[in-house]
Image: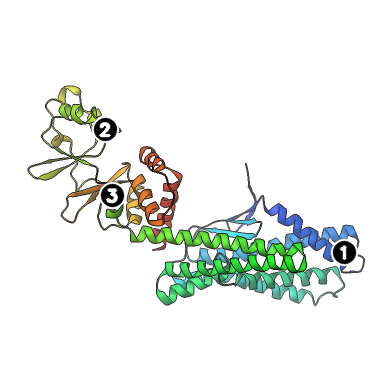
Amino acid sequence: MRTNWRIGSLFGIPFYIDSSWFLILAFVTFINAGDVNASGLSGSSPLLGWFAGLILALLLFASVLLHELGHSLIARSQGISVNSITLFLFGGIASLDRESKTPGEAFLVAIAGPVVSLILFALFFSLTRLGSESSLLGFVAADLAEINLVLALFNLIPGLPLDGGQVLKAVVWKCTGDRLSGMRWASASGKLMGFLGISAGLLLVLLTGEISAAWIALIGWFVLRNASAYDRLTGLQESLLNLVAADAMDREFRVINANLTLRDFAQEYILAEITAPGTYYAASEGRYRGLIRIKDLHSIERSEWESKTLADIAHPLTEIPSVQEKTSLVEVINRLEQIEDRRITVLSPAGAVAGVIDRGDLVKAIAVKQNLPIPDAEIKRIKAEGTYPAYMQLAAIAKSVISNQ
């Protein structure tokens, strides 16, 4: 089902509206229409009130769009690609390809949105001087000035996913030299702010009976939910950086005599395997000759299987995709995404085979570290198919970690 509609672009950045945006558009139009009709403006009528309410709602979202455009243009000046800007129920969001490289640059991207809102506040406040307070122009300008001021101040609340949370992250990052510490502090602050918003909204509903106060609780829930998502993301990024190949590798591989003929190898190992063929390495005279790839047998005539040995088809360890035991899982994922093989070899400091890693091993290692409930059946499916949403998410996070280093 389609949920986003493209409404145009500016500076090469496409703009979209989410289906939830229509709900808030109708709600804001209704509220504004009521305010206009109750204001006693000269020449006002119910029809004019509804029209003015719609215009106010659209200008509100135009302000949000410009707010997000402020973030986007500063990000682009830092070489960051901006995929899109989307308006939805709770405002807008700019989709950036990566984060800033330094805390100073991150601060500039974060503060750009509130600065744009403050500029719009000053602009609309100036427009109030062009018309009397009882005129429609004066009413609209005053309302938009107030909205942009609130938008700027609200977004400066120091908690993710708000701009103030991004500012806090940049400050902590600058002080500690650790981007992830900044994320931890800002997400923790965001969760606190979200909890306070939910509590305040529900308390106001109980004390005043005003259902509109539930909007504060709804915004608090949105902040809490997204701050928690940032916290989980930070945990995953930390795990990908702190865990190494040795923490995820599987030691269930076979080392076979390199002098074994291809026919004997096929009969004794491949045909005898009940499950899918494993990972094989050939060795002789106390050293590894290389990795055996099953697909290589298909390119050799059966008549030669009696004379050729595993040593003839072994791929030397120096020529196959491999990582060291101390390689971070971020780098392991990056290497796996660059090769055709489903498994990558893990080498010990001495250059011997220490283990193998596939995508299922990576997901399992992260699941254990993060106490995530991923059943063994799903791990087996990832191993068999090579791809799965859980792994694809890890690959995307690993890519973002690498781009931010």
Q: Residue at x 64, y 51 (%)?
A: 18
Is mark 1 in CB contact (under 8 Å) with mark 2?
no
C-alpha separation, residue under disc 1 versus residue under disc 2: 77 Å
Question: Which amino acid, by three-letter code, is at mark 1?
Answer: Asn
Which label lies toward us, 2 or 3?
3
Residue 25 picture location, percent across and down: 73, 56
Question: Which amino acid, by three-letter code, is at mark 3?
Answer: Met
Identify the residue position indicated by label 1 in the image. Answer: 37
Mark 1: which secondary structure? helix
Is mark 2 in CB contact (under 8 Å) with mark 3?
no
Residue 42 picture location, percent across and down: 92, 69
Closer to us: 130 or 206? 206
Q: Dot 3: few (<14), some (14–19), or many (≥20) neighbours within 10 Å?
A: many
Position of 197 compared to 274: left or right?
A: right
> Does label 2 or label 3 sit earlier along the sequence?
3
C-alpha separation, residue under disc 3 versus residue under disc 1: 69 Å
The structure's colour scheme is rainbow
Count of labels shown? Answer: 3
Position of 47 compared to 380: left or right?
A: right
Q: Is residue 283 visible?
A: yes
**Is 371 rendered above or below residue 375?**
below
Mark 3: which secondary structure? loop
Is mark 3 in CB contact (under 8 Å) with mark 1?
no
Q: Can residue 110 be seen in this view?
A: no
Q: Quadrant of the C terminus?
A: bottom left
Identify the residue position indicated by label 2 in the image. Answer: 295
| Mark carried by residue 249 | 3
Question: Which amino acid, by three-letter code, is at mark 2?
Answer: Lys
Position of 12 compared to 103: left or right?
A: right
